[in-house]
Image (spheres, rainbow, N blue to C red):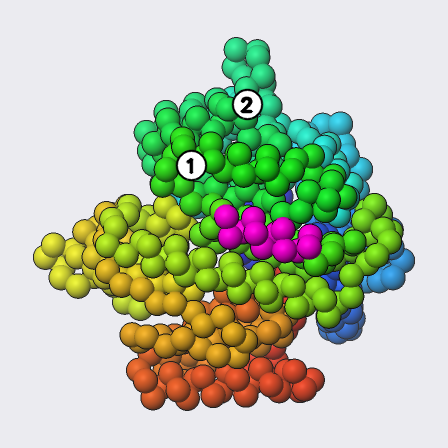
Amino acid sequence: MIPPAWRICWRPWVYVPVDAAEGADMVILNTCHIREKATEKVYSELGKLKQLKMRRAEAGNPMLVAVAGCVAQAEGAEIMARQPAVDMIVGPQSYHRLPEMIARVAREGGHALETDFPAEGKFDHLPEERAATGATAFLTIQEGCDKFCTFCVVPYTRGAEFSRPVVQIAEEAWRLAGNGVVEITLLGQNVNAYLGEGPDGTKWGLARLIRHLARIEAVKRLRYTTSHPRDMDDDLIAAHGDVEALMPYLHLPVQSGSDRVLAAMNRGHTAADYLRIVARMREARPDIALSSDFIVGFPGESDSDFEATMALVREIGYAQAFSFKYSARPGTPAAAAPRQIPDAVKDERLQTLQALLTAQQNAFNRSCEGREFSVLFEKPGRRQGQGVGRSPYLQAGACRRRRPADRRASHREDHRGAAEFAARRACGCCGTVKAKGGRALNPRHGTASDTREQVTLEFKRNALLSALAGSHSRNLVRLEQKLGVRLAQRGNLISIEGPPEQRERATLVMRALYRRLEAGEDSHPGRCRRGDQLHRARCA
C-alpha cells in the first residue's frame, strides 16, 4: 500500500500509483534499517531498478528513483556512491520536502539528498489527508527515541523524541472519524513516552490524550504501539481499566528475561520490573492480552540468560509475540561488543523460544472458545458476501453472510489458532460474535496441523517463504486460481483452505516450490521476488 504521506506529496505533480515499476515515472524505495536483511534488500532492488531505468531511458521514457526511510537516513551518501541510478535520498524527517526535491531534480538534473533533521516539523507542512481510509487508521503522535538501547538504530535514524500537539492530533482524529474510521491506532517509536502540548498550555501524557480522543463518539476503538516498559506510568495503566474504547491488548516489548542482558541492552528495567508492570496491568484490566518482542543471541547471552527469558515467557503467557535473532547494526554499541553469538546457537534458541510462544498463542486462542467478542469487520473478503475483520485481541478472521433476512454470518479466525463465529452485522461495522471452535498448530518445521477445512504449513526460513509468496502475495493469488484453494501467509506459516483433495495437492505443491527455492532455483509462477518494499508512482 502507498503510504498516505507519499500520496499527499505527489498531488502537486499529479502522480498516481501504478502496479508495476515498468510503467512508473518515479519509483520510491521505502526502507527500514532495523535489521541487516532489510538493508541488503535495498541494494538488491536498486540493482534491478538501474537496469529498468536504463531501458526506459533508451525508449525515451525517463524515470526517477528515490530511496526513502531509515536506510536513506543512515546510509544516504553511501547509497549515492554505490548506485548512481538513485536521483533522490530523503530521510523520514524530510518527507515534506519531497515535492521540492522532485522539482529541483527535474529543473537542474543531478541528485538531491535530504537527511537532515529540519527545524520545521514535517507535520506542520504535510497537507491534510481527506480521502476515506476505511474502518481503521494509524495516527502518528510521537516520533524518535531517547532510550538508546545498545542494539537499536532508531535514535540515530529518527532523532530525539518529539510529540505532536494535542490539538493537531485531535483535529486529525476528527477528520478520520468523519471519513468513517472507527478504530484508531496511535503510533510512535516510543509511543508511551508521548508528552505533547495540550490546549491548556500544559504537557499531556499518553493517558490524558487517550481519554481526550475517547470523547469522539464515532471512534469506538483505540490502540497504541510501540511501548517501552519504562514509560508505563500509573495514569496509563489506569486508563486501560477506565477507558472503554481502549482495547484490551497491549504490545509491550521486553527483549530478554535476563537482568544481565537487559543491562547490557541499556533497557533501564529488570525482569522483576516488567513482571510488576504486567501484574498491575492485569489488575487494572483482567481481560487484557499481552504481546511482546524478543531478541535471542544478544552478544554475551549465556544458556542461563536464555533460560531466564524462557522462564519469563512461561510466567507471563503471551497471546502473541515477535521474536528475532540478534542482528548487528552498524554504529550501535552492541555491534562492537565482545562474545558475539554463533548463528547456529541463535537459530537453536530462536526455534526453542518460538515453539513456546506458538504454544501459548494457540492456548490463548483456545481460551476464547465460547466467549463473545465485538469484531470490527474492516473490508470485503475475497469471496462474495464475505467480510474480513479483527477481534479486540487482533485475531484476524473472515465472515460470510448466511441468511440475508437477519444478516447472520459465520466468522472464522485464521491466525495459527482459529474460531468460528456467528455475527449479526454486515461487513464494515462492529458485531458481537461468539467463538465456537478452535484449531492448533503443530510447531515443528515442515509439518502441519489439519482440522476442519484448513491445513497450516510451517517453513524454516521466512525470507524464502516471502520470496515464494511474491510481491503483495501475487504468486499466492496465481496458485489459488490454479489449485482451487485459499492461501494466506503469516511469517513463516502458510495456511491452505479448501476441499481435502485440493488441500493435499496444494500442500505438495507448496513444499515442492519451497524446496526449489532452497536449492537456488526459480520457483515461478511470478518469478518470485525477495522483498516487498517498492512504492511506485506514475506521472499522469
Furthest residue in direction left, as rendered = 405
Question: Would residue 537 appear left or right of 333 to someone viewing this image?
Answer: left
Q: Residues within 10 Å of mark 2 (few under 14, many from 20)?
A: many
Quadrant of image for the C terminus = bottom right
User: Circle 1 sits on which residue?
Assistant: 282
Prevailing secondary structure of the magenta residues:
helix
The segment highlighted magenta reads 304-315
| Residue at x-position 54% and y-position 26% | 233
| Residue at x-position 36% and y-position 41% | 287
Q: Disc 1 marks which amino acid?
A: Arg
Question: Would residue 435 appear left or right of 204 to someone viewing this image?
Answer: left
Q: Residues within 10 Å of mark 1 (few under 14, many from 20)?
A: some
Count of number-bearing discs: 2
Q: Residue 32: tell me if it is visible.
A: no
Q: Disc 2 marks which amino acid?
A: Gly
Asked which quadrant contains residue 499, the reply is: bottom left
Spot occupied by residue 469 in the image (x, y as percentages of width and height): 54, 73
| Residue at x-position 31% and y-position 64% | 438
Q: Examine the rendered structure and indicate whether residue 104 appears above or below residue 487.
A: above
Q: Nearer the viewer, residue 331 or 530?
A: 331
* Res. 497 mark: none
In front of the other: label 1 or label 2? 1
* Res. 205 mark: 2
Would you say residue 305 sits in the magenta stretch? yes
* Dot placed on the residue nearer the N-terminal end, 1 or 2: 2
Kindly state the secondary structure of the residue where label 2 is placed: strand
Q: Nearer the viewer, residue 459 or 106?
A: 459
Asked which quadrant contains residue 503, the reply is: bottom left
CA gap between label 1 and label 2 equals 21 Å
Spot occupied by residue 5 in the image (x, y as percentages of width and height): 59, 44
Would you say residue 39 sits in the magenta stretch? no
